[in-house]
Image (cartoon, rainbow, N blue to C red):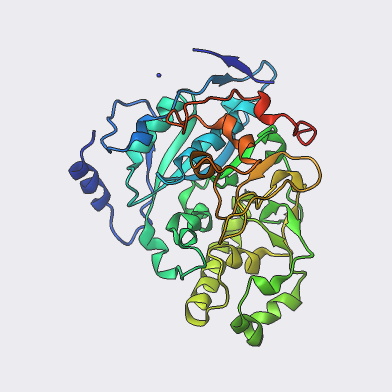
Amino acid sequence: MSRVLHNPSLNDAVLLLLLLSFPLTCFGIRYFPSNGEKTEIHLGSDILSGFTEAPDYRNGVSCSRATIHIAMTIDLEYLRGTIAAVHSVLRHASCPENIFFHFIAAEFDPATPRDLTRLVRSTFPSLHFKMYIFREDRVINLISSSIRIALENPLNYVRNYLGEILDPSITRVIYLDSDIIIVDDIAKLWNIKLHHNRVIGAPEYCHTNFTKYFTDNFWADPGTSTWVFKKRPCYFNTGVMVMDMNQWRKGMCQKKIEHWMEVQRSKRIYELGSLPPFLLVFGGNIEPIHHRWNQHGLGGDNVKGSCRTLHSGPVSLLHWSGKGKPWVRLDDKRPCPLDHLWEPYDLYKGKRDGRRIAVGSDGLEGYSGYFE
């Protein structure tokens, strides 16, 4: 198990010049080295200076040098979620120093990539990571309106482009949404085998009613609806995926997803953001992993964000997919019961009442039987 050791601008014009120095025809993904360079956070948002430093999680003596790659998006709106997710991963990892995070930031987010790099470095001084810029014009013309405006954020589509964003030498990655916490060793998820050249591993649900994911236009057109009858249609949530990037690139999966997004733009075949194209490409052909690795839906539905309970069985990962986010409900003093499981990993100092809960404290009382 890990040991815990309790132990640390470019102005806008220069940053804009750097961005414009890349030709518009290229994909425009870059990273900012996380080398501890002294840059100042110039955005006047309290949240960018409002996080406390996490404990310095270190490897135990039995750890190898094998690297675990994790890709996540990072932006101002979901920043507390991202930081809490990283904290939870490190807290429960058997070899936290082996973990390498790939953070993808939006091109036009109020917090610049350099702001975010500085923040991550100050919150997790020993973390291995890179910060990338996602060129939003890569996907903006493919995004159609959704039932909830948050689902139209270009960062929701970053997972489509990991084959181009990540270096070709990275052959496997775990993709995680920002509204999760992990209460188990991430190495267990990393080591899952993907059989039969499958691209993705994720918990799947093969008794789902697919009529709610697609419109009448989809079912009325034989050119689209015959997809359902060609293979077993199984739902999976794209917020937690183990991805074989060699197979992803070899199978031209990005192009296949973009095809369905283009169909959506012309025929309106679904209502739900970035999920349906993944279902159309991969549904029924993923590596099924234990449901404990994505207890999703804790944010309620996409309209009201009502409270939900845990699914039956053990839990390794909790996922607040849906409208309700735990940090928002906690700040509004209207939390759902399960939001208190997220709270111990929140490193934001400006909490609603200044109350801090230690990881492993009474905030988890009554749920210990799930985490086994």
Residue 113: image quadrant is top left
Residue pictured at 63% horizontal, 30% vertical: 66
Q: Quadrant of the N terminus?
A: top right
In the displayed structure, does residue 364 sit left or right of residue 153? right
Residue at point 36%, 25% (across, down):
36
Q: Residue at x 66, y 82 (%)?
A: 219
Expressed as whole percent of the image width and height from the top left, the position of residue 341 reads 64, 35
Q: How many marks?
A: 0
Residue 187: quarter of image:
top right
Residue 336, percent from left and from top: 62, 44
Q: Position of residue 11 (x, y in %)?
A: 20, 38
Examine the rendering and report whether any part of residue 82 can be seen.
Answer: yes
Name the quadrant of the C terminus.
Answer: top right
Q: Is residue 87 visible?
A: no
Residue placed most toward the observer, 167 or 341: 341
Residue extending farthest left: 13
Q: Position of residue 302 (x, y in %)?
A: 57, 60
